[in-house]
Image (cartoon, rainbow, N blue to C red):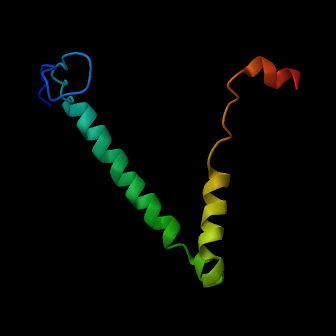
Amino acid sequence: MKGWARGERFSHRGDVPDSPSWSAEQKETVDRMRAEIRQLSSDVVDHPHWKSVPTENMAASRMLLKRQARPAEAPENPEAAEAA
């Protein structure tokens, strides 16, 4: 993306340089990962398990699955967590 000089119409404090472009390898990696995410999302949504979940519980069940799949967040201060 092309950079710009501060000027009157921009609220930031300095000039913005041109953004570097992605390498071919980076573009291929992003394309591969996006395709994998789409496939995994489809696999989860279309899994036969969801036919056994009542419609009124579907959203809550999917949110529970989402929370359980995420790793636990690391504490901001690891020493305080060890002392607790």
* Left/right of residue 68 with respect to residue 21 in the rendered view: right
Residue 6 sits in quarter: top left
Measuring 61% from the left and 75% from the top, which residue is drawn there?
Answer: 58
Q: Position of residue 82 (x, y in %)?
A: 83, 22
Measuring 25% from the left and 32% from the top, which residue is drawn there?
Answer: 25
Residue 53 sits in quarter: bottom right
Q: Quadrant of the C terminus?
A: top right
Q: Position of residue 14 (x, y in %)?
A: 22, 15
Q: Quadrant of the N terminus?
A: top left
Measuring 68% from the left and 31% from the top, which residue is drawn there?
Answer: 74
* Left/right of residue 21 with respect to residue 41 in the rendered view: left
Residue 7 versus residue 73: which sits nearer the camera?
Answer: 7
Rendered view: 59 above or below 25? below
Measuring 87% from the left and 21% from the top, which residue is drawn there?
Answer: 83
> Looking at this rendering, what residue extends furthest in the front direction?
8
Rendered view: 65 above or below 79? below
Q: Position of residue 43 (x, y in %)?
A: 48, 66
Rendered view: 65 above or below 69? below
Residue 23 versus residue 4: which sits nearer the camera?
Answer: 4
